[in-house]
C-alpha cells in the first residue's frame, strides 16, 4: 500500500525559532500534497494545497509568509513554520494524493510544541 | 461551502455492544467519503472509503453506509472491543479529483471492558 512518511514526529522548540517538517511519499509519486493542522479536540483543518513545481495555495486565514511550503519533487513536500510562537503549537499532518484519485494517504503527523 | 458534522461527539459503551456513528454533510456533490480512526496524539488510519457511486463498504466488524442524496453516512461497529476506543473521523472529498478532504470533528469512542 501507499506509504507517506512524515518527520519529525515531535518537535519542542523555543519561541522565535523556525521548524521544518518533511512529508515524503515513499512508493508513489504525488503531484499534490496537503497540509492540515489540528488543535486539541478540534478536527483537521486544511492549511494549504501543495502542487509539485508551483506555489502552494493557502486557505483563508493561513499566513503564507509564516508557513512556507516547498514541493520541489514528486515525492517530497516541506512545511517550515517560521518564527514559531506558542500559538503555533499544534498537530500538523500531511497527506499525499494518490495520483489524482482523491484517495489520500496520510503521514503520522508532527506534534509541535513552542515554548 | 461543504460542512461535515458528526454526532455524537462522544460515546461510551460496554464491551460487546453494537454501535452506530453518524456523519452528515451539507453538499451532496462528493467524490468519496472516508472514515478514519485516530488514536490520541497519533495520525490517521483509514478504515473505509466509499466512492460516491457506492452505498456501503465493509471491513471486518466495520460497515459504512452512504446516502449521498440525504447527505448522510453511518459507521456501524459490531461487537465493540476496548481496542476500538479512539476518535473516529468522517471526511468527504468534493466532486473533483485531487482536492483536499473536509473533516468532521469526530466522535470519541470509549469501550469499557
Image: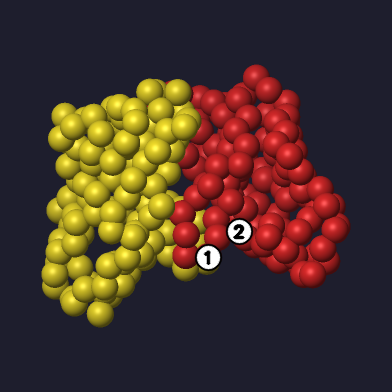
x then y, percent, for residue B103: 52, 47
**Residue A57 visible in the displayed image:** no
**Within 10 angstroms of label 1, few (less than 14), some, or many (20 or more) residues?**
few
Q: Is residue B56 above or below residue B85?
A: above
* Quadrant of the rendered image containing residue B91: top right
Residue at (25%, 34%) from the top-left corner?
A75
x then y, percent, for residue A115: 25, 80
Identify which residue, B40 or B113, lies in the foreground.
B113
- For disc 1, the chain is B
Tint applied to chain A in the drawing: yellow
* Quadrant of the rendered image containing residue B72: top right
Residue at (73%, 50%) from the top-left corner?
B21
Marks 1 and 2 close (CB-CB < 8 Å): yes
x then y, percent, for residue B98: 39, 27
- For disc 2, the chain is B
Q: Tell me the tag on residue B87.
A: 2
In three-dimensional space, the C-alpha distance between marks 1 and 2, rounded to whole angstroms, equals 8 Å
B12 left or right of A23? Answer: right
Residue at (47%, 32%) from the top-left corner?
A1
Q: Which chain is red?
A: B
Residue identifier under label 1: B40
Amino acid at each position: 500500500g501507499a506509504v507517506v512518511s512524515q518527520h519529525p514526529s515531535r518537535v519542542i522548540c523555543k519561541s522565535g525559532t523556525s521548524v521544518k517538517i518533511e512529508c515524503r511519499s515513499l512508493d508513489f509519486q504525488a503531484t499534490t500534497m496537503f497540509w492540515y493542522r489540528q488543535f486539541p479536540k478540534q478536527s483537521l483543518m486544511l492549511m494549504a494545497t501543495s502542487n509539485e513545481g508551483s506555489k502552494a495555495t493557502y486557505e483563508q486565514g493561513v499566513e503564507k509568509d509564516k508557513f512556507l511550503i516547498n514541493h520541489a519533487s514528486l515525492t517530497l513536500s516541506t512545511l517550515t513554520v517560521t518564527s514559531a510562537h506558542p500559538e503555533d503549537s499544534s498537530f500538523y499532518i500531511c497527506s499525499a494524493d494518490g495520483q489524482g484519485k482523491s484517495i489520500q494517504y496520510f503521514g503520522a503527523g508532527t506534534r509541535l510544541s513552542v515554548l | 461551502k461543504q460542512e461535515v458534522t458528526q454526532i455524537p461527539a462522544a460515546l461510551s459503551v460496554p464491551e460487546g455492544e453494537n454501535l452506530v456513528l453518524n456523519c452528515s454533510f451539507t453538499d451532496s456533490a462528493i467524490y468519496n467519503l472516508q472514515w478514519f480512526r485516530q488514536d490520541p496524539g497519533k495520525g490517521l488510519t483509514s478504515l473505509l472509503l466509499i466512492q460516491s457511486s457506492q452505498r456501503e463498504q465493509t471491513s471486518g466488524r466495520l460497515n459504512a453506509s452512504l446516502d449521498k442524496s440525504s447527505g448522510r453516512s453511518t459507521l456501524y461497529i459490531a461487537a465493540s472491543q476496548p481496542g476500538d476506543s479512539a476518535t473516529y473521523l468522517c471526511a468527504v472529498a468534493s466532486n473533483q479529483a485531487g482536492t483536499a478532504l473536509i473533516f468532521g470533528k469526530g466522535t470519541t469512542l470509549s469501550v469499557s471492558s
